[in-house]
Amino acid sequence: MDIMGKELIVGEVLKPQGIRGELKLKPFTDSAEEFLSFKRIFLDGEEFKILSARTGGGMVYLGLRGVPDRNAAELLRGRTATIPREEAPEPAEGRYYIADLLGSEIVTEEGEPIGELTAIRQAATDIYTVVAAGKEILFPAVKGVISKIDVGNKRIEVDRKRFYEVAVL
């Protein structure tokens, strides 16, 4: 999930599903099933009450109030889905919302500053983008690279040796 103000980005509308106005969404959450607990969703800032939700194949299918048919659903294609931050479930132990990590200072365990975390690309292994002295550094968030995450102080410590072994400078 990413951040947009006080909202968390939870997915993207891919296309209409069927003829009754259902939407197919690509979830940006750890699990598509998280959508089953949402009561409402915002699509590019426009609020919709969720009437039905189901998952399948890692995708989410939503029926929304005010979206009665395929034509109405087609108009929502490509929109970003968000929920208010306060309605988001607490992440599991050792898991974090991307929104909470962005803007963190990346430092070595010795305290040597590397740069600021500006983006996280979700993949099999998340790819972190750090801006240091105006240049982007990419590194995978693999075991042994990140030593400690302090969300409250916006600080992520990395093992210097491992970081420079896997970083794309």
Image (cartoon, grey):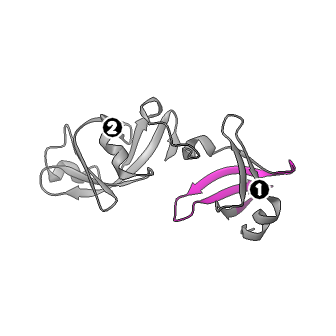
Q: Amino acid at mark 2?
A: Phe
Q: Quadrant of residue 101?
A: top right
Question: Residue 94's mark?
Answer: none
Identity of the residue drawn at 56% across and 44% down: 96
Above/below status of 47 relative to 31: above
Is 26 displayed left or right of 129 in the figure? left
Q: CA distance from mark 1 to mark 2?
A: 39 Å
Magenta residues (range): 109-137
Q: Quadrant of residue 50?
A: top left
Q: Secondary structure at mark 1?
A: loop
Check residue 127 for magenta coloring.
Answer: yes
The residue identified by callout 1 is 134
Query: Could you tell me if the residues under marks 1 and 2 are in contact, i.e. CB atoms within 8 Å?
Result: no
Q: Secondary structure at mark 2?
A: loop
Q: Amino acid at mark 1?
A: Gly
Name, please, the residue furthest toward the front. Answer: 93
Above/below status of 164 relative to 134: below
**The one of 119 and 70 positioned closer to us in this rendering:** 119
Local crowd size for mark 2, using a 10 Å CA cut-off: few (<14), some (14–19), many (≥20): some
Identity of the residue drawn at 16% across and 52% down: 71
What is the chief secondary structure element of the magenta stretch? strand
Identity of the residue drawn at 78% across and 58% down: 159
Is 128 displayed left or right of 33 in the figure? right
Local crowd size for mark 1, using a 10 Å CA cut-off: few (<14), some (14–19), many (≥20): few
Identity of the residue drawn at 47% across and 40% down: 8
The residue identified by callout 2 is 38
Question: Which circle's residue, 1 or 2, is located before the other in the chain?
Answer: 2
